[in-house]
Amino acid sequence: WGLKHVLLEMTGQSTSRDDVLGEFSDAAGYVLKRRIRNNPPNRRWQAGWLKRTETYRRPLL
């Protein structure tokens, strides 16, 4: 998975920082779940990957 795939899943309609971060987090989770569907052995990493995508909701500063 990559940043390009995540950005392509985003609608671009969000305007507030928190909404954009939430949309990015949701898109990253969707892309990762699709990757796991396409390559089931990656399922062993799913919990950690999805936990990490939830951290994208929080601003860095």
Image (tube, grey):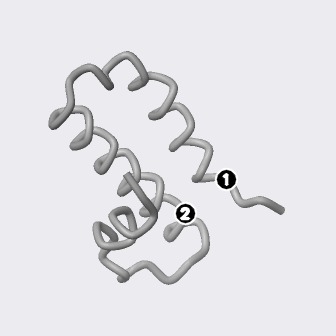
Residue drawn at 31 percent across, 21 percent down? 43
The residue labelled by disc 1 is 58
Residue drawn at 40 percent across, 52 percent down? 28
Which badge, 1 or 2, is on the more N-terminal residue? 2
**Relative image position of residue 22 (x, y in whole percent):** 49, 58
Quadrant of residue 47 within the rendered picture = top left
Crowding near the residue tagged with mark 1, few <14, some 14–19, many ≥20 C-alpha atoms within 10 Å:
few
- Give whichever of 55, 17 is nearer the camera: 55
Residue drawn at 50 percent across, 83 percent down? 15
**Relative image position of residue 11 (x, y in whole percent):** 30, 76
Discs 1, 2 touching: Cβ within 8 Å: yes
For marks 1 and 2, give the CA distance: 7 Å
**Dot 2: element:** helix
In the orientation shown, which residue stands out farthest toward the right? 61
**Dot 1: element:** loop
Q: Which mark is residue 34?
A: none
Q: Is residue 16 left or right of residue 23?
A: right
The residue labelled by disc 2 is 21
Question: Tag 2: residue type?
Answer: Leu
Residue drawn at 53 percent across, 41 percent down? 54
Question: Tag 1: residue type?
Answer: Arg
In the image, residue 57 above or below residue 36: below
